[in-house]
Amino acid sequence: MKRKPWSMNIVMTIGLVVGVVLWLGRYDHRHAIFQNVSLIIVPIATSVVVVSFRNRRKRVGPFEPDTIARNNRGRV
């Protein structure tokens, strides 16, 4: 059975939800809405990095050896 890569869109959505929950927990109505935006961006970026490393380690998706060989022969 062939392994499937984790979807980057789904994981980015999960990271966004986690980031919004963290942001809402730290929200202070006396300040601007764009305070602590890093609480939203960091979970998204972390999830993307984790999925990229997982897909690369399992050699699935764009890191599959057949895909790499086809791209090296000129098929993009």
Image (spheres, grey):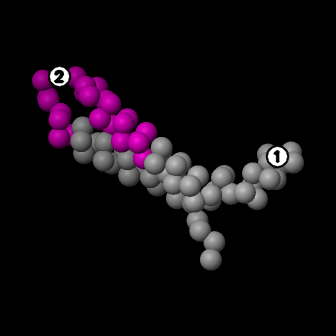
Residue drawn at 59 percent across, 68 percent down:
3
Q: Amino acid at mark 2?
A: His
Question: In screen coordinates, is 8 left or right of 34?
Answer: right
Q: Would residue 21 be counted in the magenta stretch?
A: no
Q: Which residues are magenta?
A: 24-47
Question: In screen coordinates, is 54 left or right of 34?
Answer: right
The location of residue 58, given as percent across then percent down, is 57, 60
Residue drawn at 24 percent across, 42 percent down:
22
The quarter of the rendered structure image containing the N terminus is: bottom right
Give the residue pinned by disc 2.
31
Res 52 seen here: yes
The location of residue 36, given as percent across then percent down, is 26, 28
Check the image and report above or below for 3 versus 45: below
Give the residue pinned by disc 1.
72
Q: Amino acid at mark 1?
A: Asn
Front tag of 2 and 1 = 1
- Spatial distance from mark 2 to mark 1, Cα to Cα? 52 Å
Identity of the residue furthest to the top in this view = 31
Question: In screen coordinates, is 18 left or right of 30?
Answer: right
